[in-house]
Image: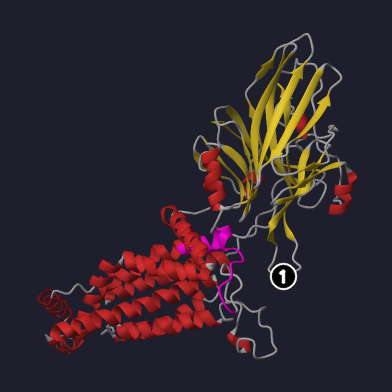
Amino acid sequence: MKEQGNLLFAIVLSLLILLGFQYFFEAPKMKKEAERKKLEQTENLNNNSINKEDDISGYLEINEALNKDNRIEIDTDRLKGSISVKGLKIDDLTLKNYKETLSENSESVTLFKPSSTKGGYFSNFGWIKATKEENYDLPNDQTIWNTDAKKITNNNPITFYWINGQGIRFEQEIIIDENYMFKIKQKVFNNTDKNINLNPVAKISRTDTPKTQGFFILHEGPIGIIDNVLEEIDYKDLKKNIGPLEYNTKGGWFGITDKYWLATLIPDQNSNVVARYQFYTKNNKEKYQVDYKGGIIEIPSNKSITIENLLYAGAKEVKLLDKYEKQYSIPRLDFAIDFGWYYFLTKPFLYILIFFKNMFGNFGVSIILLTLLIKLVFFPLANKSYVAMQKMKELQPQLIRIKEMYKNDKTKLNQEMMALYKREKVNPAAGCLPILIQIPVFFALYKILFVSLEMRQAPFYLWIDDLSIADPTSILNLFGLLPYDPNFLPKIINIGIWPIIMGATMWLQQKLNPQPTDPMQAKIFTFLPIFFTFILAPFPSGLVIYWTANNVLSMGQQILIKKKMERKKNI
């Protein structure tokens, strides 16, 4: 039983650490930074003309910013917004299928906003001169593009054009599919008598540091796949860095991720590019920029060229990311979802949950069915474990006698106990196996509930409206019977119905297990259901439902094994 006690202590300690990171971790106050040596960055890649932003101090209201420039409307199955003809910025994007809250009047989630607003966020594509000797004008963030169209709809491309007055015509054709993928076709017509050399560029720009939700549970911020390797850069680390971080890579993708949403640039996967991540300040505004520069393209006199690149701007739906990964040969696009160290469990579990949800229409039911499936897969191991536990329970009287006989001789006590285990062919550590199996499953499911979009605002039944957050009921107001709202109190004492049910099933399960012969261990085991009730109270309700279902199924399994062993004895 000592091994079981040690294992349970390790589990409790792990849960405390996990809880501390999510709910009580508070990063030490950063020391006041020394004056930055780098000046406000007004130039980009090789004096990149695409980076010339509006010189506006302060912020504009969203409606004021949207009315400031002429715009082309975006209205597809899943996106609503507009493109500014000034700089050809995709800077107004709302996700039709996702709401900010569960309220009926909740607004849809906004991904992109004009750069002149608080939290501005946009993307655009363009060109830079390959050398300083190139003497002609290029379109930039101040350029007014022309088009005859008024609206972009599903797979209905719009072409924008701009002529520099020096014999060069630039075009951009923007196509949006039925989901969140933008296809950007850039054309350049060189009607001069000289060859010209250009580098294609693209960027995602974000104003202000967004509020992150994950602490160390997930990554939020600049992200990318560089030469098939995942790069995750924290906002605070990018702020500390002097100058941009540059990477040479073939293909890949580079963007900024939030908990549930992603904006990423996807160049031609056969092209070598220089990807950059940088932080700078402009007009007292913090700016984060992810961009890339493609290789030099020579455009002969009186010739034209066309290149094609992609922008993903939308929800991090695992099936959709996997679909695009195959369709466009994008490496590891699913890594935008932070599945963590348990990727080999987390992603398959998520797919199983989605499969069950499609069958039964509820993710809570899916969690219970996944628990049952895991029980079936590990039944042979768990069966051996529970048989060993039942034998240990039957040996309790003998163990108590041995402890009484050799209570003053620990060496002899251990020898006699081991002899008893050997004689009865019992492994005292075998009972820990169900708990051991449960640890990676617990953390994998916790990760799914915390990071996967599919679990966001997914209801169960009755009072559970969102499986990704804690049970909203509270024992402090008798689960809504009293006219008192205790939500201002920490959730660890604001215990809901499901954590109490979980604690009760854990207590019942303990009654089926052999009791520790050591008095101190017995007290600890008695206290554990109460302890876990408080510890799991702030955790996602879906995780508590999993733990409860696991307890109930484990009890059923133990009862069946016990009856089976009793029948064998009676034969």
Q: Compared with residue 215, is residue 382 higher up or lower down, i.e. above or below? A: below
Helix, strand or loop for disc 1: loop
Give the residue at mark 1: 103
The quarter of the picture where the N terminus appears is: bottom left
The percent position of residue 365, horizontal first and vertical second, equals 49, 71
Looking at this view, is 41 or 130 the one in front? 130
Q: Compared with residue 406, is residue 107 higher up or lower down, i.e. above or below? A: above
How crowded pointer 1 is (Cα within 10 Å; few <14, some 14-19, many 20+) is rated as few
Amino acid under disc 1: Ser
Looking at this view, is 439 or 525 the one in front? 439
Query: Residue 177's quadrant in the figure?
Result: top right
Q: With 70 as the anchor, is 273 left or right in this view?
A: left
Is 232 part of what is drawn in magenta?
A: no
User: Could you tell me which residue is drawn at 15 percent across and 76 percent down?
Assistant: 421
Looking at this view, is 524 or 99 the one in front? 99
Q: With 48 as the anchor, is 416 left or right in this view?
A: left
The percent position of residue 433, horizontal first and vertical second, equals 29, 69
The percent position of residue 514, horizontal first and vertical second, equals 27, 83
The extreme top residue here reads: 193
Query: Residue 29's quadrant in the figure?
Result: bottom right
User: Could you tell me which residue is drawn at 44 percent across and 55 percent down?
Assistant: 348
Q: Compared with residue 100, is residue 141 higher up or lower down, i.e. above or below? A: above
Is residue 61 visible to us here?
A: no
Magenta segment range?
Answer: 445-462
Q: With 60 as the anchor, is 11 left or right in this view?
A: left
Is 456 part of what is drawn in magenta?
A: yes
